[in-house]
Image (cartoon, rainbow, N blue to C red):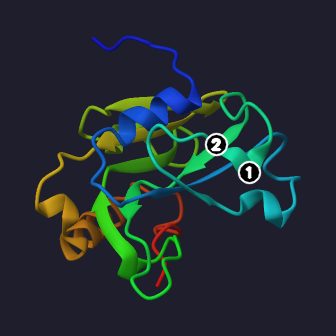
Amino acid sequence: MSRVIKVSNREFLEAVFAGAFPNTYTIIASFEGDPYKVGREAWAGEPWVSGQQLKAFGYDWNSGNTYLTVSLFKPDPQTGACRRRKELFDSLRAVMIDDVNTKVDRRKALLQPSAIIETSPRNFQYFLFIKQDKDSRDRSKCEQLIDAMIRAGLTADNSDPGMRA
């Protein structure tokens, strides 16, 4: 039997990225307001490390819309820049099934989610936390997992907009 535990955006992020590898980061976008009405600049992500405040947003980001990348990355070895790029991938921390109950049939999710977030009435994100081992750091294996999820119909449009070249 699952139980509901209310947590803040920050508490959720701290849980997903607990025990992150040294010199790694994820990318977080956070803003107040309707995601369909905010400008493009609101979607610009910021590198984030567990325990760090998101300074760029200028408000209590626990109460706004917070979007996360489910992977950790390493800084670019040439420039030190912190970006979300495949070649900077370090590890997969979770997989997320979006739009469960509205666009993705919840019966297709065969594993018990580690966390469920209701993003709007009767619309959910299912998160499955990934065991941190050598496979979670193998980008090829992680991409195979995501491809298998897409083939299983666990995405709204049979693609993954999060994986970029």
Q: Within 10 Å of the Cα at label 2, are there few (<14), some (14-19), or many (20+) other Cα atoms?
A: some
In the rendered image, the vertical position of residue 82 relative to residue 115, given as above or below:
below
Mark sitting earlier along the chain (2/1): 1
Residue at 79% x, 35% y is 59
Identify the mark at residue 121; answer none if there is no mark. Answer: none
Residue 3 point in image, percent of width and height: 37, 11
Q: Mark 2 — residue? A: 66
Q: Nearer the viewer, residue 67 or 104?
A: 67
Residue at 38% x, 58% y is 71
- The quadrant holding residue 113 is top left
* Amino acid type, callout 1: Ala
Residue reaching furthest to the left: 134
Residue 30 point in image, percent of width and height: 69, 46
Q: Nearer the viewer, residue 109 or 44?
A: 44
Residue at 27% x, 54% y is 21
- Give the left or right position of residue 77, taking residue 11 as reference: left
The N terminus is located in which quarter?
top left
Residue 104 point in image, percent of width and height: 48, 48
Q: Within 10 Å of the Cα at label 1, are there few (<14), some (14-19), or many (20+) other Cα atoms?
A: few
In the rendered image, the vertical position of residue 120 relative to residue 45, given as above or below:
above
In the rendered image, the vertical position of residue 104 relative to residue 59, given as above or below:
below
Count the marks: 2
In the rendered image, the vertical position of residue 156 relative to residue 13, given as above or below:
below
Cβ–Cβ under 8 Å for marks 2 and 1: no
Residue at 53% x, 76% y is 81
Q: Mark 1 — residue? A: 56
Say which element carries label 1: helix
Q: Nearer the viewer, residue 80 or 71?
A: 80
- The quadrant holding residue 89 is bottom left
- C-alpha gap between disc 2 and disc 1: 13 Å
* Amino acid type, callout 2: Thr
